[in-house]
Image (cartoon, rainbow, N blue to C red):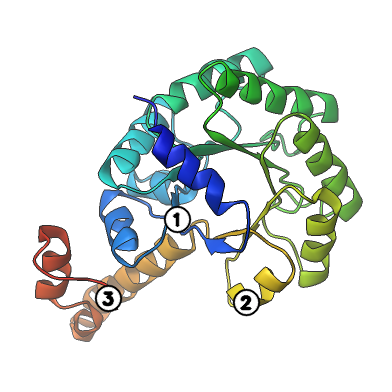
């Protein structure tokens, strides 16, 4: 089932002015808690969802990814953006087919990235990358055009941190129909500002994976959307592993004292308590 017009309209409205944080849950429970904290939209994380199945990032099969998107989107009443990786295909026509399937999960937006998975040529050829975004745009338009398309350049992720090439690709993705532009792991605020200016007036998403900036600082640069990728999942896994390692290695249980109180977390899911801080 496609997302309602209300959800897609709300998601587009968030991108028109100001700056908002779109945090990344890794399962239904984390999605519900984030909505309870007042976030107006969510985005899935390919790494976080893969880890819940005991797999590394970019190792989910298409059907596994689609099932995850459907579960998260149906569990909350806010727009959900899909980390749809590279569209789970190489050729544009296949990307379009998979995007059409993703739209039926109820998502309000999705991203298509240009990393190839080939260590010798880690980015798809420029022309192919543009054609893949065009194919995603066509698939969205064929189904009413409401789903918001984000074009992602993975140059900094794959070890090719070339700002000029990143800007060239993002501009081309905007021309190909991307509504929002995204280059994960940008190195500094100057690079972020350069990209915001280069693709204006299209909105830009910035990934914050560490404590290197603030929402206010990014808003001042003109950033419209901030995500955290697998950051929240890593925090959760970190606490889990620290407590479990203490039990395994020391036979003590002090790490369990750092957990949230049972009544508070259980009440958040039962609706008995208000989880907002």
Mark 3: secondary structure? helix
Q: Is residue 237 left or right of residue 125?
A: left
Residue 213 appearing in the image: no
Specify which label sits upstream in the sequence, 1 or 2. 1
Which residue lies under the disc numbered 3? 243
Distance Cα–Cα, label 3 vs label 2? 34 Å
Find residue 197 and report its horizontal and vertical position in percent.
84, 57
Which residue corresponds to the image point at 40% horizontal and 24% vertical from the top-left?
104
Which residue corresponds to the image point at 73% horizontal and 39% vertical from the top-left?
119
Q: Relative to the observer, which residue lies in front, 49 or 192? A: 192
Specify which label sits upstream in the sequence, 3 or 2. 2
Location of residue 17 by image quarter: bottom right
Q: Residues within 10 Å of mark 1 (few under 14, many from 20)?
A: many
Which residue lies under the disc numbered 1? 24
Q: Relative to the observer, which residue lies in front, 50 or 182? A: 182
Specify which label sits upstream in the sequence, 1 or 3. 1
Query: CB atoms at circles 1 and 2 under 8 Å apart?
Result: no
Badge number at residue 216: 2
Q: Against 142, is 114 above or below? A: below
Which residue corresponds to the image point at 52% horizontal and 39% vertical from the top-left?
58
Of the two numbered discs 1 and 3 in the rendering, the one whose residue sits closer to the viewer: 1
Q: Residues within 10 Å of mark 3 (few under 14, many from 20)?
A: some
Of the two numbered discs 3 and 2 in the rendering, the one whose residue sits closer to the viewer: 2
Indicate the quadrant containing the C terminus: top left, top right, bottom left or bottom right.
bottom left
Find residue 116 and report its horizontal and vertical position in percent.
69, 33
Of the two numbered discs 1 and 2 in the rendering, the one whose residue sits closer to the viewer: 2
Q: Relative to the observer, which residue lies in front, 18 or 240? A: 18
Q: Against 130, is 186 above or below? A: below
Q: Residues within 10 Å of mark 2 (few under 14, many from 20)?
A: few
Distance Cα–Cα, label 1 vs label 3? 23 Å
Find residue 265 and report its horizontal and vertical position in percent.
17, 69
């Amino acid at each position: 089932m496609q997302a309602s017009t209300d959800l897609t309209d709300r998601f587009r409205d968030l991108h028109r002015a100001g700056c908002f944080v779109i945090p990344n849950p890794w399962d239904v429970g984390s999605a519900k808690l984030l909505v309870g904290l007042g976030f107006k939209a969510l985005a899935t994380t390919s790494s976080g969802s893969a880890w819940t199945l005991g797999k590394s990032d970019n190792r989910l099969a298409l059907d596994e990814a689609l099932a995850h998107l459907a579960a998260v989107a149906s569990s909350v009443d806010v727009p959900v953006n899909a980390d749809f990786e590279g569209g789970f295909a190489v050729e544009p026509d296949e990307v379009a087919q998979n995007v059409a399937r993703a739209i039926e999960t109820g998502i309000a937006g999705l991203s298509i990235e240009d990393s190839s998975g080939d260590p010798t040529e880690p980015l798809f050829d420029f022309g192919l990358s543009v054609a893949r975004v065009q194919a995603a745009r066509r698939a969205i338009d064929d189904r009413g055009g409401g789903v918001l398309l984000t074009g992602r350049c993975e140059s900094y992720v794959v070890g090719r941190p070339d700002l000029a090439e990143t800007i060239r690709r993002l501009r081309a993705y905007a021309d190909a129909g991307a509504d929002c532009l995204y280059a994960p792991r940008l190195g500094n605020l100057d690079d972020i500002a350069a990209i915001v200016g280069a693709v204006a007036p299209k909105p830009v998403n910035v990934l914050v994976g560490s404590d290197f900036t603030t929402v206010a600082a990014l808003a001042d640069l003109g950033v419209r959307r901030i995500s955290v990728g697998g950051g929240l999942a890593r925090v959760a896994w970190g606490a889990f592993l620290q407590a479990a390692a203490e039990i395994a290695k020391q036979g003590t249980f002090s790490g369990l004292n750092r957990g949230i109180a049972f009544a508070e977390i259980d009440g958040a899911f039962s609706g008995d308590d208000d989880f907002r801080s």
